[in-house]
Amino acid sequence: MKNITLGPINIASSLLATLVRTGSGISVNSAVLKPEIPFKLFDIEGCPYCRLVREVLTELDLDTEIYPCPKQGERYRIYVKKIGGKAQFPFLIDPNTDVQMYESLSIIKYLFETYGQRSLPLKWQLGSLQTISSMLASTVRPGLGNTKKKSCAPEQLLELYSFESSPYARLVRECLCELEIPYILHSCGRTDLGEWLLPPLRDALNIVPNSILENRKILLEKVGRMAIPYLIDPNENIEMFESAEIVKYLEATYAVND
């Protein structure tokens, strides 16, 4: 059966989900402090509450370890229930401060105050409106990034360079969530005007954005170009661009067919 994740209709719906959120999870105003030890975020990609937290990770330019907890998931949902007392998501563990917390808006406030070193922006003070908008974005992609598929677990965490509202990175994150594959999320939001141009147009115009963000500098130095998403799998010594190719790779490598 052809994977609908690779089809034009599914890509179009991912673009629509981005439009519904009116640009949240793209532009960056970096956190003043960066955690010495990565957060652990237990998350469901298609969950509207989890989306809000991931948007703020992009906006504050914070990396985290993502532990996918799709419905019927068996790897990390049990752990969250054991540690926190209930299988509710998102669930954040910050080993730097020994904080463990549920509730997306509480997590967002914590991230801005602790690492952003500033009060909650007006946009996020209107948390109920953001939640409604995020719910609408989820209805555009019903069921995707929510339910477990059989898979084998990697020994080492994968790495994904991504920003939350990228419609192409979303396809990869949905696949990672459904396969319950944990990964390090490297936030790669935008700060430079040239970064808003699509990679083919940037290449055609010979524009090289001058990003101030460390992850974008690392990726540009590493592979000589800037395109999101970019996956690193240390288990197979694989590194690759292009969402469709990444999804094919993940399913071929980690999915278990009945």
Image: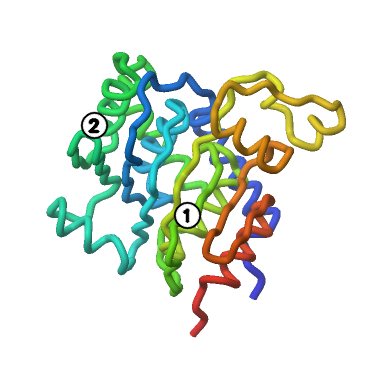
Q: How many marks?
A: 2
Coordinates of residue 14 in the picture (x, y in percent)? 58, 46
Position of 91 relative to 196 (above/below) = below
Q: Tell me the quarter of the picture where residue 96 sits.
A: top left
Identify the residue at horizontal 45%, vertical 62% (top origin): 178
Q: Are marks 2 and 1 in contact (CB under 8 Å)?
A: no
Query: Element type at marker 2?
Result: helix
Residues under labels 2 and 1: Cα distance? Answer: 26 Å
Identify the residue at horizontal 64%, vertical 65% (top origin): 248
Q: Tell me the quarter of the picture where residue 114 sits.
A: top left
Asked if residue 234 lies left or right of residue 96, the reply is right
Question: Quadrant location of the N terminus?
Answer: bottom right
Amino acid carrying label 1: it is Pro
Question: Which residue corresponds to mark 2?
Answer: 106
Label ID, residue 142: 1
Mark 2 Cα shell of 10 Å, populated few (<14), some (14-19), many (≥20): few
Scheme of image coloration:
rainbow
Residue 5 seen in this snapshot: no
Q: Earlier in the sequence, mark 2 or mark 1?
A: 2
Coordinates of residue 68 in the picture (x, y in percent)? 38, 56
Coordinates of residue 210 in the picture (x, y in percent)? 67, 21
Asked if residue 140 lies left or right of residue 42, the reply is right
Q: Tell me the quarter of the picture where residue 122 sits.
A: top left
